[in-house]
Amino acid sequence: MTDQPVLSIKNLKTYFYLEDRVIKAVDGVSLDVYRGRITAIIGGSGSGKSVLSLSILKLIDNPGKIIDGEICLDGVNIRTLREKQLLQIRGNEISMIFQEPTSSLNPVLKVKSHLFEVIHTHRRAISNQAAINKFREVLVRVGLKNTDQILESYPFELSGGMCQRVMVAMGLLAQSQILIADEPTSSLDLTTQAAILEELMHLKNEGMAIILITHDLGVVAQMADDVYVLKDGKIVDSGTVYDVFASPGHEYTKSLLAAIF
Amino acid sequence: MVIIFKSSLLVKLKKKKSAVVGFVIIIAFVLAGIFAPVISPHDPYAVDITQKLLKPCGEFPLGTDQLGRCILSRLIYGIRTSLTTAILATVLMLAIGVPLGIIAGYVGGWIDNVIMRLADMASTFPSSLLALTIVGVLGPSIVNIMIVFIVLWWAPFARITRSMVIKLKEKEFVMAAIAAGSSQTAIILRHITLNAISPIIVLATLRIAAVIIHVAGFSFIGLGSQPPIADWGVMLSDSRQYLISQPLMLLWPGVTIMLVVFAFNILGEGLNAVLAPASGYALAVKEGDEPHD
């Protein structure tokens, strides 16, 4: 952990302004993400994990608003960037795997078209045939067989697990610096989970920074390097996975751990 | 992309028998309209008073009208007037309604409000009143009647597109596309509009039928096509005076209009049944959707 964090969040606040009250979904979160490490963000439902990950990409829509804090990517504060510059960052620097695999793919586009879109948004000069070969390669890497058939399939013709793996393949194809994985394994069976997690480990070893958002402590124990525990929009516990699991500093972490061990 | 979409659509449509019937009738009409000079037995405008008001016979399969013109030939040439106006008018309604609906749904806010209030005005304005006004100012012609329907009937297209866009823009895959860095154009065209296309196709099919019947109606009362143009509405209007002596003159254009409208309607219903389950959005095309006159 000697080098600079690739992503550094300081005192981030994302509030949702409803008619009669304000929901402080993320309330003063600070965290650092390093290259070649997996940073896990854990917390129960409604703790603000997903809002945090959407805030990083500035994907918060009305009535939500990022009201304070810094999101520094390689020293550049994303919060001050304009929409056009954000397009360069989304997908190029930071890519994201969403929670719901089946609804995160466009039902009228083939898998092939989804993968082509990743390539086109990143303006890679590559021939169609070379692109298709590359697609086959990433699909095999996430453990899919029959790649030709899958490329020609529409999302609704695939199972949830297959869609999730296609999403991961899209993340691989983007070759971004940071990958945010929002519950990447929650809807998968155990063997598929293992395959996806292994691929994430692989990416980490290649030097990618991974933010793993989950409530599955088993996955965290196995995968993560750094852990942040989120409760009610605040970080209540943080440190390396060893520190947090061995000596939890907060009651909430203790209760989380007690629930599984 | 579009070709694949269409071919898979045709395969699915085959399962729906009534839609196939409608489709075949429409294709037959379109072909007859295109090859009208080849297949019509006579010149539709050739007047021969000595042959007037004939019953169907070998030379005139459907008989002749009050000026001795071949009714079958006039019906065949009438396809050209009817279908081109209906299809052109519907395409223009789409061209106005769909982009406005996309803007209203995607941008929201006051722009949405302005567009939808315009749509409300268009839907509530009586078409016959507007037709009289436009015809009064510009003179009776089929083009002016087309203008009436384009001015009023873009509204349902805008409304249905808007509601689809509003539903779709909250979808996870749109969020995922934004997160992946897709440009706004790509999101609107590939992720939103492509998903909204099926109900629009269904509505357009049904609208073609509605335009045909309304344009014929306006031609009947003398606001649309003018004699001697071969037009079904005009033919109906001509037949009124000979209702007792030559009732078949009324029957033929009536049956033709009914057949075409029926064909478009069952095709539209079939498309709705076929497309709705795939896209997950059924279109409510029952009563209440038709604009009032």
Image: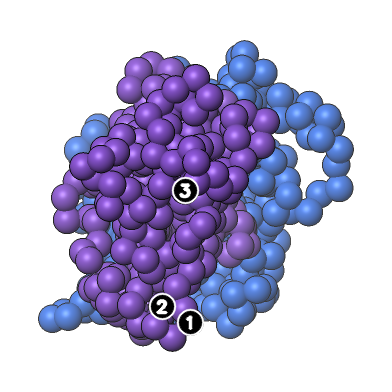
Chain colours: A blue, B purple
Q: Mark 1 is on which residue type?
A: Leu
Residue A23, by quadrant, is bottom left
Horizontally, is B243 left or right of B276 in the view? left
Q: Are marks 1 and 2 in contact (CB under 8 Å)?
A: yes
On the image, numbered disc 2 is attached to which residue? B135
Which labelled disc corresponds to residue B160? none
- Say which residue appears at 58% left-offset and 64% top-offset: B184
Q: Are marks 3 and 1 on the same chain?
A: yes
Which labelled disc corresponds to residue B138? 1
Q: Depth check: give the residue in front, B189 or A54.
A: B189
> Which quarter of the rendered picture does the C terminus of chain A lie within?
top left
Residue farthest along the front direction in this orientation: B50
Gap between marks 1 and 2, in whole Å?
Answer: 5 Å
Instruction: Point out residue B243 in the picture as x, y percentages from the top left corner.
Output: 24, 45
Q: Depth check: give the residue in front, B168 or B151.
A: B151
Q: Chain of mark 3?
A: B
Which labelled disc corresponds to residue B67? 3
Q: Depth check: give the residue in front, B167 or B132.
A: B132
Gap between marks 2 and 3, in whole Å?
Answer: 27 Å
Instruction: Point out residue A62 in the picture as x, y percentages from the top left corner.
Output: 35, 74
- Quick check: can you spot residue A74? yes
* A132 versus B287 height, above or below: above
Q: Residues within 10 Å of mark 3 (few under 14, many from 20)?
A: some
Q: Are marks 2 and 3 in contact (CB under 8 Å)?
A: no
Nearer the camera: disc 2 or disc 3 = 3
Nearer the camera: disc 3 or disc 1 = 3
Say whether disc 2 or disc 3 marks the residue closer to the N-terminus. Answer: 3
